[in-house]
Image: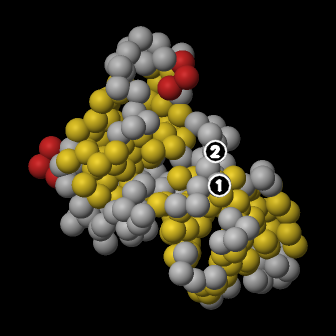
Amino acid sequence: DQQVKQNSPSLSVQEGRISILNCDYTNSMFDYFLWYKKYPAEGPTFLISISSIKDKNEDGRFTVFLNKSAKHLSLHIVPSQPGDSAVYFCAASANSGYALNFGKGTSLLVTP
Amino acid sequence: EAGVAQSPRYKIIEKRQSVAFWCNPISGHATLYWYQQILGQGPKLLIQFQNNGVVDDSQLPKDRFSAERLKGVDSTLKIQPAKLEDSAVYLCASSSGPADEAFFGQGTRLTVV
């Protein structure tokens, strides 16, 4: 059973525009959420995180929004750059002491 | 700072053979994870170590998979015997604590034929 869902397998955005990647979760015990970015033939790299006590966290061009009532989070990339083209994984953990549950990923393509 | 090291990068074996993967985490990281990523899926946790103790191995197919982390540093993951459905990328990750973000190695791509 997939507890973290990324329903869009792929997304294409023009350079300079906003990219919005979505993620839904089913486990109400999840209290820590992360986004990872993955290039081909490399391991995932940490991008940004948010704890359940916040509803927004910003780091440069990347902002993560958390809507606990909807069990939904999103990653906004503004402005998008061609180097952002990668697979983005949403991940969540419960009780802050356990390993991450990952979604299936969304492949982002930023075109010039 | 050196990252998480994994070897080998690629491995091709026949079904029913055995295989072992090695991971060297970031120095000082107490928590180590092994994930399995099947093509088109997100990484799935196989086992989590805290120092050299197992925290979670609920999704490890224990009839064929085993893992150890001797001395709380390096870790090995073994599959014996391998099945076709074990074809995947095996990712090792480490973190300074279980609540912190994990750093991943490049992974070992296993193909079982």
Residue B6: x and y in percent read: 35, 47
Distance of mark 1 from mark 2, alpha carbons? Answer: 8 Å
Residue under the point 59% across and 67% down: A35
* Residue A26, numbered circle: 1
Which residue reaches farthest top?
B16
Q: Chain of mark 2?
A: A
Which residue reaches farthest left?
B71
User: Which color scheme is applied?
Assistant: secondary structure
Pointer 2 local density, CA inside 10 Å: few below 14, some 14–19, many at least 20: few
* Residue B22, numbered circle: none
Of residues B99 and B76, the one drawn nearer to the viewer in this rendering? B99
Residue under the point 78% across and 71% down: A20
Image quarter in which the C terminus of chain A is found: bottom right
Residue B91: x and y in percent read: 44, 46
Pointer 1 local density, CA inside 10 Å: few below 14, some 14–19, many at least 20: some
Rendered position, A103 above or below A37: above
* Residue A2, numbered circle: 2
* Three-letter code for the amino acid on which mark 2 is drawn: Gln
Q: Chain of mark 1?
A: A
Would residue A39 appear left or right of B46 to someone viewing this image? right
Image quarter in which the N terminus of chain A is found: top right
In the rendered structure, which disc, 1 or 2, sits on the residue that comes first in sequence?
2
Of residues A70 and B10, the one drawn nearer to the viewer in this rendering? A70
